[in-house]
Amino acid sequence: MLISVDVTEKSFGDKVLYTGLKFDVQPGEKIGLIGRNGTGKSTLFNLITEDDTDYQGEIIAKRGTVIISSRQEHHGHEDKMVLEYIQGDLPEYVELSHIIDTYPETMGDDTRKIQKYSEALDRFVQLGYYQTEDQISHAFDDYQLDQKLLHANLGDLSGGQKRMIELIKVQRSRGDLALIDEPTNHMDYVAKEAFISWLNAATEAVVVITHDRDVLRTVDRIIEIRDGKAYPFRGNYEAYLKINKNQITAQVNEYDLTQRRIVNLRDDIIRFRRLKEKARDPGTIRRFKSQEQQAVAELAKLSNLEKPSFWIDQESAGDLNTKMTVAYQKYKAQNIKLGTNKDESQSSRLLVQLDKLSLGYGDDVLFKDVSFSLREGERIRLHGRNGAGKTTLVSAIMAEVEGTKAKSTAFAGTIATEKELKLGLYEQEIDSKYLPMTLHDAIEQVYMDKDVQVSDQKIKQLLSNYLFNPITDGLMPVSRLSGGQKARFQLIRMLCNDPQILILDEPTNHLDLPSIEELENALGDYKGAVIYISHDSYFASKLGGETVTIGS
C-alpha cells in the first residue's frame, strides 16, 4: 500500500463534506476520482498533500513516498520563468543543482563535500535531470505549447496554459504518487492522446480527478465520492457503469423497503396508542405501551437516515425492470433541468452557408477552403487542433449573424447566414464582467443583455433547475464559483433567449457525469441547429452530425 486515507469527518462551516471516507492507493495504480460537482474532490487532494489539515481522521503514506500534485493557485510564482518554475518543483532538483553548481568552487580537498558532490552527481543522473530541459521541450510539443513560453514568466500565461504547465511538471517529476485535477480540459485530441499514452505508461501511481470518459476508459479503478464516502469500483468506465447499476439498484430497493417500513411504523404507532387507550388490563396496557415505544424508537432511527444519492447512466437504467424503474425514478438524485426548445419546426431552412472560406489574422492564414451548410435541426462538429481556427470560425459566423465586423480577415470564400437569428453561445471562459457580480445579479444581467425580461422568481427557479441553492448560492460572487458551477452558469446564459442555433465550445469541461448525460439528452431533444467543438469522443458520438475538419 502506498497511501491510506481514512477521514472520519471534514466540514466547511455547517456543511459536512465527508463522513467516514476511506480508501487506499496501491503502487503504480491508476485511479479515476469522480463525483458530483461540490462533493469535495479537489478538497481531498488538499488533504493528501497536507495543504489542508483541518479534518478528523488520518492519512498515512508509506515512508519516503513522494507525492506530486498540480498546483491550483500560483501566487508568489508569477515572476518565475516557466522552465525555472517546472524544474524548481521537481523532487530534489533545486538542492542537487545547488550542490553541483556551487561545490566545485568551494570544496577543495574537503572529503565530506567531495563525497556529497559525487552523490549529488549520481543522484542527478539517476533522476534523469540532465535531460530535463529536452524532455520538457518535447512535452511542450505534445501539448501544443509554443516553445517561447519556456522562457516566459508564469504570470503571463493563460489559465489553460498554466494547467498544461502543471501537467508537464507532474509528469516529469516521477514521484511515487501523482495527483492531477481535470487534466484534459482545454486539450485538443492530439494532446489528450499524448496524456492518455503517458498515463498508460507511467510507473508511478496516479489519481486523476476527471469526468472525461476517454480517460476513465483507461484507468485501473474508479473511486466515486458520494454522500460523504468513497465508493471504489474495480476496472474502467465500462466496468463502473455495470457495477454501479447493480449497487444502486440494491440501494434503491433497500431504501424503498425502508420508506415502506416507515409508513407501516406510523400506522403501528397510531394502532398501538388506540389499543392502549381501549385496554383496561394493566398488563395489556403495558404491552401496547412497550410496542408503541419500540415503534417510535425505530421510526426515529429510520427517519434520521439521509436519502442516498442515486444515479444510474441512462443506458443501464433502460435495462431495469418495471418495478425497479418506478422506484429509481422516484428516488434518483436531482439533475440539472435544461430549458431547450423542443418544438418541432415545420421547415428545414438554411441558416448558415460557408463556401470555400479562408480565415486568418493580418497576413497569416489559419485555414483554407472550409465549406458546409447548416439547416434547422442539423449538427456540425468542428474538429481540429488547438489554434487551427475553430474559435475564429465561430466568431466570424457570429459576427455575420449579428451584423458586426469580424476580428479575423477573410482571404477567400464567403459566409452567408439568415439575418436576425437568435444565437446561444457556450464559452469555456466566463466574460470577466460577470465575475464580480453575485450569481443572482449575473443571471439577471445575462437576460438584460439579450433584451429578455426576467423576474426574481424566474431567477430562483433557474438556480434550482441548475442545482444551485436559490438563497445562499444566489448571493455568491461568480468569481468564487467552482469550475462545475461556472459551467452551469454558462448553460443558463446560452439558453436564456430561446436560441435557434447553439454554439458550444467544449461544453463537457467541468461537468460531472450526470450533468453531461442531461446535456446530451437536452441537445438530442433540441430542434434548432447546433455547431459544437468537442474532443470528448463519447459526447461527439452521442450528438452526431457532420464533422468538419479545420486545419490540417
Image (tube, grey):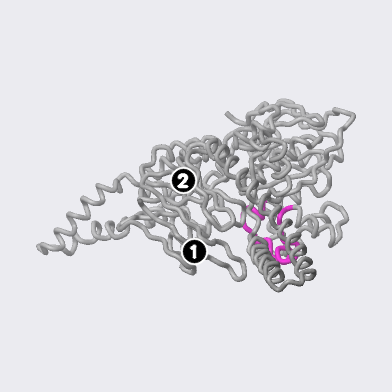
Closer to viewer: mark 1 or mark 2: 1
* Amino acid type, label 2: Ile
Residue pictured at 52% horizontal, 46% vertical = 183
- In which image quadrant can residue 477 be found? bottom right
The front one of 339 and 291 is 291
Residue pictured at 49% horizontal, 41% vertical = 143
Residue 390 position, x and y percent, is 65, 37
Residue pictured at 22% horizontal, 55% vertical = 120
User: Start and end of the magenta stretch?
Assistant: 466-487
Viewport quadrant of the C terminus? top right
Is 545 covered by the magenta stretch?
A: no
Residue annotated with mark 2: 31
Residue 501 position, x and y percent, is 79, 38
User: Quick check: 401 left or right of 19?
Assistant: right
Q: Mark 2: give few (<14), some (14-19) or many (20+) Cα within 10 Å.
A: many
Q: Along the polypeptide, which appears first: circle 1 or circle 2?
A: 1
Residue annotated with mark 1: 8
* Tag 1 near tag 2, CB within 8 Å: no
Residue 66 position, x and y percent, is 35, 55
Residue pictured at 69% horizontal, 27% vertical = 546
**Residue 157 vertical position relative to residue 363 in the rendered view, above or below:** below
**Residue 13 vertical position relative to residue 79 in the rendered view, above or below:** below
User: Quick check: 91 left or right of 324?
Assistant: left
The front one of 153 and 383 is 383
Residue 359 position, x and y percent, is 67, 34
* Amino acid type, label 1: Thr
